[in-house]
Image (cartoon, coloured by chain):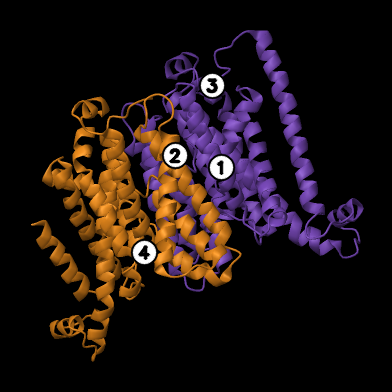
Chain colours: A purple, B orange
């Protein structure tokens, strides 16, 4: 396994660390700028482009001459939803990848997104729930699946190949549950079904954004609190314990936070394919490892979702949900990662 | 004993369904008299049963061959992305070239299965250690996801083809008729014969490549022959009833438990086992969701995924 995420762990020289920190801060700022630019683009350009002054006027509530509906009712909820969902997926995915020290161990590959998605569909189609209740069902299912996968792959190193294979099996099963539930719901509109199969931002409303924002605050905060311990865990369990880290408690907190983030995002926008998987490795490549991976991964997740959604809406011949775009980018990346790990002589 | 089981499955598949039928009606339906509703139901179930048995046999043999060639206990046409490749080609044919008709679907399915198999094997076997189970599984999963993303991208803007494609994708044998079955027969027969002809090479390969060559087997030719057989089988099966996963994984393992590891026995036994599994999965799908029907792909995923996990756990993983 090439541990892309681990590159800086063994470079304690302080000047190197300072240089790394400076680089990471620059990277974070660039990512932030990128994100702001994308949001501005999403708000001002769609089927037609609005002058920036009109967009600002609409946002501040002033009379904007017709721009009000387009900006505040159509584009703003969509942009906000993309932003928070992307942040959640990026953070949650990278947390898993860092904790398990394996870029393949992201929630969308090991079945946690699939579990949350299947549970959300079950809650909506069969139990007729909505809003917070759906998110609650999705989060508990995500936690249940995480426990199940941990249990099934335990023994001789849970972070290994077995975890990923078990997870792939579990996701295959859960995906067929989702397909079945959707096929069985006769009045179900197909665009809505796509949300649960690949993830989509269509018809996003501000009401749906708030639960995700709250989840981002709670679970993101939990992750931030655990970030230092998580960083030390990368040195190995024994070294971390010597430094005063309670490894099992940290793992539990990080798992809870990551599952919470992913499940809330999934219950709002569906399992947007591969965002959680892609963000971590890209962040690790840009920041050269270290403790800035998590925030960078969150920003990259948001950029991926915003850009994917924009491309899916306006830059392709047909209007496609964001999950199709990120899936089409992510699958080749996964293949690339496999080839690359092979070429470096690592065993995957 | 295996053949008895097969006959039993076929009988149950004819007799059990959403509508209960009497014995006399089954006989009437089989002999072509469709006077009562029950007899008509049996007549509808007939091609469906044949399709489930044929597709199951094809997938079972394809799985056994793939496990033999790659020497990988987790190989399966579904997991390795071969079925998804076949599905992608068929959907491209429907969406872009307005293709209909079972015979064309066959060619497309086989072509797609071939491309996907070569692609996944090429990616999975790069680097040291060759094609390990994990690398092949990941390459197959990635290929499946990419293929299904493209399928969605093709189908979504096209309301006219969407419903049919979606039902076909989950893996249905419900809409079977003898007319759609006929064009598949040459493909299935050719695939089966090629696979059976390569059984000796697969046996030798199980000892390792060098030893196989030392035993005087033409390893490369045998591999290509059996791979072509497997591709024909799963391409045709996918074109008939959509991508169905896990049959090719479970069946060869079960067959090995009963009949040993000799591929000359294993392949026919896998064919029968696959037919039994898919046939009974279809019956189960009809029974548990009455009056609706559970698609057979969902049932096999439910049986197969736990088995996949169990195999992955039992196997001592190389690497990591």
Position in image of residue B142 (x %, y %): 47, 43
- For the residues bearing labels 4 and 1, Cβ distance under 8 angstroms: no
Of residues B94 and B284, the one drawn nearer to the viewer in this rendering: B94
- For the residues bearing labels 3 and 4, Cβ distance under 8 angstroms: no
Indicate the quadrant containing the N terminus of chain A: top left, top right, bottom left or bottom right. Answer: top left
**Which label was assigned to residue A6?**
3
Residue A233 in the figure: left or right of residue B223:
right
Answer whether residue B90 is visible to the viewer in this image: yes
**Which label was assigned to residue B139?**
2
Q: Secondary structure at mark 2?
A: helix
User: Based on the displayed image, in which of its 4 quarters is residue A78 positioned?
Assistant: bottom right
Q: Which residue is mark 4?
A: B240
Q: Residues within 10 Å of mark 2 (few under 14, many from 20)?
A: many
Chain ID for label 2?
Answer: B
**Which label was assigned to residue A330?**
1
Measured in 3D between alpha carbons, the distance from the residue under mark 2 to the one under mark 4, in whole angstroms, is: 25 Å
Measured in 3D between alpha carbons, the distance from the residue under mark 3 to the one under mark 2, in whole angstroms, is: 24 Å
Comparing marks 3 and 2, which lies closer to the viewer?
2
């Amino acid at each position: 396994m090439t541990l892309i995420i681990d590159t800086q762990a063994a470079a304690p020289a302080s000047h190197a660390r300072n240089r790394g920190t400076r680089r990471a801060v620059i990277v974070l700022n660039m990512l932030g700028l990128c994100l702001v630019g994308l949001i501005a683009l999403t708000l001002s350009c769609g089927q037609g482009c609005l002058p920036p002054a009109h967009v600002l006027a609409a946002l501040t509530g002033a009379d904007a001459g017709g721009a009000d509906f387009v900006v505040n009712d159509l584009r703003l909820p969509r942009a906000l939803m993309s932003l928070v969902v992307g942040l959640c997926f990026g953070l949650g995915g990278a947390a898993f990848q860092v904790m398990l020290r394996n870029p393949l161990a992201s929630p969308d590959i090991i079945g946690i997104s699939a579990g949350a998605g299947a549970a959300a569909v079950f809650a909506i189609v069969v139990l007729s729930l909505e809003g917070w209740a759906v998110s609650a069902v999705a989060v508990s299912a995500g936690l249940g699946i995480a426990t199940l996968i941990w249990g099934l792959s335990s023994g001789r190193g849970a972070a290994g190949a077995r975890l990923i294979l078990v997870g792939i099996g579990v996701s295959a099963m859960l995906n067929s549950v989702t397909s079945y539930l959707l096929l069985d719901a006769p009045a179900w509109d197909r665009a809505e079904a796509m949300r649960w199969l690949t993830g989509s931002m269509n018809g996003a409303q501000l009401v749906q954004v708030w639960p995700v924002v709250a989840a981002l605050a709670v679970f993101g905060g939990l992750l931030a609190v655990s970030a230092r311990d998580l960083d030390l865990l990368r040195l190995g369990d024994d070294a971390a314990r010597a430094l005063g880290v309670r490894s099992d408690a940290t793992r539990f907190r990080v798992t809870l936070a990551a599952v919470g983030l992913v499940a809330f995002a999934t219950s709002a926008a569906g399992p947007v394919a591969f965002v959680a998987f892609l963000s971590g490795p890209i962040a690790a490549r840009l920041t050269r490892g270290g403790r800035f991976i998590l925030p960078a991964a969150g920003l990259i997740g948001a950029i991926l979702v915003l850009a994917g959604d924009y491309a899916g809406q306006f830059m392709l011949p047909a209007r496609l949900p964001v999950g199709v775009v990120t899936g089409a980018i992510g699958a080749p990346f996964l293949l690339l990662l496999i080839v690359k790990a092979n070429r470096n002589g690592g065993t995957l | 004993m295996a053949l008895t089981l097969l006959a039993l499955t076929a009988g149950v598949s004819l007799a059990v369904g959403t509508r209960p039928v009497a014995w006399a009606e089954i006989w009437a339906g089989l002999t072509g008299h469709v006077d009562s509703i029950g007899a008509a139901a049996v007549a509808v179930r007939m091609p469906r049963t044949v399709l489930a048995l044929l597709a199951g046999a094809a997938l079972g043999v394809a799985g056994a061959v793939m496990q033999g060639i790659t020497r990988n206990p987790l190989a399966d046409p579904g997991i390795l992305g071969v079925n998804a490749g076949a599905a992608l080609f068929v959907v491209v044919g429907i969406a872009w070239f307005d293709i209909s008709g079972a015979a064309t679907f066959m060619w497309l399915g086989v072509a797609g299965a071939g491309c996907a198999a070569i692609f996944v094997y090429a990616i999975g076997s790069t680097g040291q250690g060759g094609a390990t189970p994990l690398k092949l599984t990941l390459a197959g999963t990635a290929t499946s996801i990419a293929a299904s993303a493209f399928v969605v991208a093709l189908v979504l803007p096209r309301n006219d083809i969407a419903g049919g494609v979606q039902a076909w994708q989950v893996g249905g044998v419900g809409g079977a008729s003898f007319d759609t079955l006929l064009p598949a027969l040459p493909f299935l027969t050719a695939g089966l014969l090629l696979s059976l002809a390569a059984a000796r090479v697969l046996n030798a390969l199980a000892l390792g490549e060098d030893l196989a060559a030392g035993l005087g087997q033409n390893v490369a030719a045998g591999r290509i022959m059996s791979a072509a057989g497997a591709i024909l089988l799963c391409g045709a099966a996918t074109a008939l009833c959509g991508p169905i996963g896990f049959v090719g994984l479970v069946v060869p393992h079960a067959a090995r438990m009963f009949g040993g590891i000799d591929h000359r026995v294993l392949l026919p036994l896998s064919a029968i086992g696959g037919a039994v599994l898919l046939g009974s999965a279809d019956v189960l799908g009809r029974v548990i969701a009455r009056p609706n029907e559970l698609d057979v792909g969902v049932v096999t995923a439910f049986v197969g995924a736990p088995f996949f996990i169990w195999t992955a756990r039992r196997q001592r993983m190389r690497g990591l």
